[in-house]
Amino acid sequence: MRIRLCGFSALFSSLHALHCENASCLDSQLMRSCVCPATSAPSPSKIGNVRLDQVTFPSLKVHMFDTFRRHGRRQLFFAHPDTVQPVLQFDSSVPDRRTKDVGYGWQPNFPASPASTSIFYTPYQYEPPTSNRATTEIFFGRYRWTRGGIRGSDYGNEVSGVP
């Protein structure tokens, strides 16, 4: 969803776990920037078909976030550890959250794996450059891919053993 008002714009992202029937329906932006293992293979994780009342930790779970930090001296990709930005939580609060305080996330196709999904950020011309001015920067999936999905927690200890 892109919103443009008075010369300002924002690109808000919501979680794929709310919208996808399975991991193969990833949006094109995520596909270009994310190494997602075996998305066409059957997965033991359940993605999609969830209700908002199934969120286990609404005050610790990100619902929507801006893809880039737009407040501060420089714009940064949301997954950059130095990013601090307002995020919409499932309890409807909008606190400023620091990305480095968020868990690393998981690989939804392999929920038992301790590994997280990696995002390869290669900005388009209209997106903020990488923080190190390289062509690509690699980040953990963080709240884009919360460990435990809708039943997980983004802040504090990551929940493990969640189906």
Image: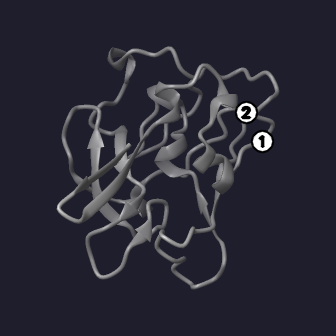
Q: Is residue 148 above or below residue 4?
A: above
Q: Residues within 10 Å of mark 1 (few under 14, many from 20)?
A: some
Question: Which of the numbered marks, if any, corresponds to residue 12?
Answer: none
Vertical side of 131 occupied by 108: above or below: above
Measured as percent of width and height from the top left, residue 81 is found at: 46, 67
Which quadrant: the C terminus? top right
Is disc 1 placed on a helix, strand or loop? loop
The residue drawn where x is 38% and y is 43% is 1
Please give the name of the residue rendered at 39% of the width and 15% of the height, measured from the top-left corner.
Answer: 51
- Secondary structure under tag 2 reads loop
Q: Which residue is mark 2?
A: 110
What amino acid is at disc 1?
A: Pro
- Image quadrant in which you'd find residue 69: bottom left
In the figure, 93 relative to 81: above or below? above
Q: Residue 37: which disc?
A: 1
Q: Position of residue 12 (x, y in %)?
A: 37, 48
Pointer 1 with pointer 2, Cβ within 8 A: yes
Q: Is residue 42 left or right of residue 56?
A: right
Residue type, numbered disc 2:
Phe
Single out the residue that lies furthest toward the bottom.
133
Residue in the image at 49% along x and 41% along y: 158
Between the residue at mark 1 and the residue at mark 2, the CA separation in whole angstroms equals 8 Å
Comparing marks 1 and 2, which lies closer to the viewer?
A: 1
Vertical side of 119 occupied by 89: above or below: above
